[in-house]
Image (cartoon, rainbow, N blue to C red):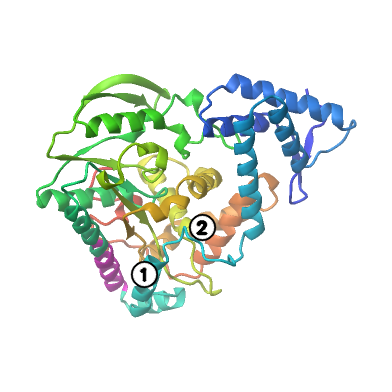
Amino acid sequence: MPKFTQVIKRTGAVVPFNKERITNAIYRAAVAVGGRDKETAEILSAKVVEYLNSTYPDNYIPHIEEIQDAVEKVLIESGHAKVTKEFILYRKERNLKRETEGKYASTPNENIPWAKIWHVLDWAVSKKLNTVELLNERIRNAEYPYIVHESECAYEDDIDCGANMILERADQLKMVFISGPSSSGKTTTTIKLEKRLLKSGLKFKALNIDNYFFDLAMHPKDEFGDYDFETPQALDLEMINEHLVQLTQGKEVLIPFYDFKTGTRHLEQTKFKIDKNEILLIDSLHGLYPAMSVDIPKEQKFKLYIEPLLQMKNNEGQFIRWTDIRLMRRMLRDSVYRAYNPQQTLEHWHYVRTSELRHIIPYISTTDFIVNSGMPYELPLYAHRLLKHFERWTEMFKDNVLKEDALTRAERVYNLLKAIEPMPEDWAVPKDSVSREFIGGSVFDY
């Protein structure tokens, strides 16, 4: 048992000590390098507490950095070199993120699709939708239906372009990955893309990657103890890659079935095979992640990436963050389709974003085409639906040191939404729009 009950965070705030967080951090690092032994993680975390007890005096309040130093020491001395390396890398990334938060990088970021962004920005300027004030002005001039039409046309043009690129390589392709971070619009885009390609004579067979989740008990947890479904290590990547190889060779595989109600996976449940004239279609959060298809030749894969690349500045002259758009989308989608409290979405967004930065964003440069799903007209809809929620959250989390991330996001989004002309009606939004994936009322079955 630890002889201390509190920890000093990097901000200086003092919070309760929780041994489970040490266990989760060690297990998460182990999972990242292929380990799945929770019992060992618990033994190692006990050693960390033992070391801290022997190193520091009674009533001492350790700093979080001192605890992390202790974790590294125990991992190294216990012979877990690979886990130690992963833990150090994760720690370094987190520190770097904190140091650069809110600052512009001094060097160009290779993970940002600059050419695509400039194209989207040029479009936004030409439509007078590159600032919140210009958006408001057009809404006040009763131009909201025109904004919807212009936005939808740009999105459909992107899908047309992606479909044409796939058709050009159809003779070589064995599979198409539809990838993108949470609430980017993958499902709607996949449906629309498939319809276009079917009309051109291509035949597809969809593979549900969710069936390859490990049992819930084997999932890594985040620093707050929540099961992390967002990391690629929650999936059996080795089995996925093996099955993809066999499928491209014309072989039949037995795919597993994942029961989300019980959190358990049942192996070898369904026969699956693709014919010579069929292409595998894979809608996956981690379609760009190398380990998922490491043994599939590049020419046999087409990777399409989706992101709401909105290019609009707020009233402070800062570009609206794409992650904030997706956060609002997920809140609405989860409440409409999954009976999930929007506040839970806000509080859990920290591990969604962490996983994106580690496992999705670094591989954007490997994609074959990028679809922009960002719609300027969606912000007024969110202002009407979510403004009061964010106002309440800015007060609720104000003095809670354990909810600093939620507070920062709530304040930022609240300041954005209160500056936008709200739109209470969504009649102008097409029933097959990607926005319907989040606000409801779609002709598609999600």
Q: Quadrant of the N terminus?
A: top right
For image coordinates 27% across by 67% down, the residue present is: 154
Residue sticking out furthest to the right: 57
Q: Quadrant of the C terminus?
A: top left
The one of 167 and 205 positioned closer to us in this rendering: 167
Label 2 and label 1: CA atoms lie apart by 30 Å
Q: Which residues are magenta?
A: 144-156
| Magenta portion: prevailing SS class | helix
Is 218 placed left or right of 145 in the picture?
right
For image coordinates 74% across by 41% down, the residue present is: 64
Q: Is residue 149 magenta?
A: yes
Indicate the secondary structure of the residue bearing disc 2: helix
* Residue 235 horizontal/vertical position (percent): 42, 32
* Residue 104 horizontal/vertical position (percent): 58, 67
| Residue linked to disc 1 | 120
Indicate whether 15 appears above or below 127: above
Indicate whether 384 appears above or below 76: below
Q: Is residue 103 magenta?
A: no
> On the image, which quarter does residue 273 sit in?
top left
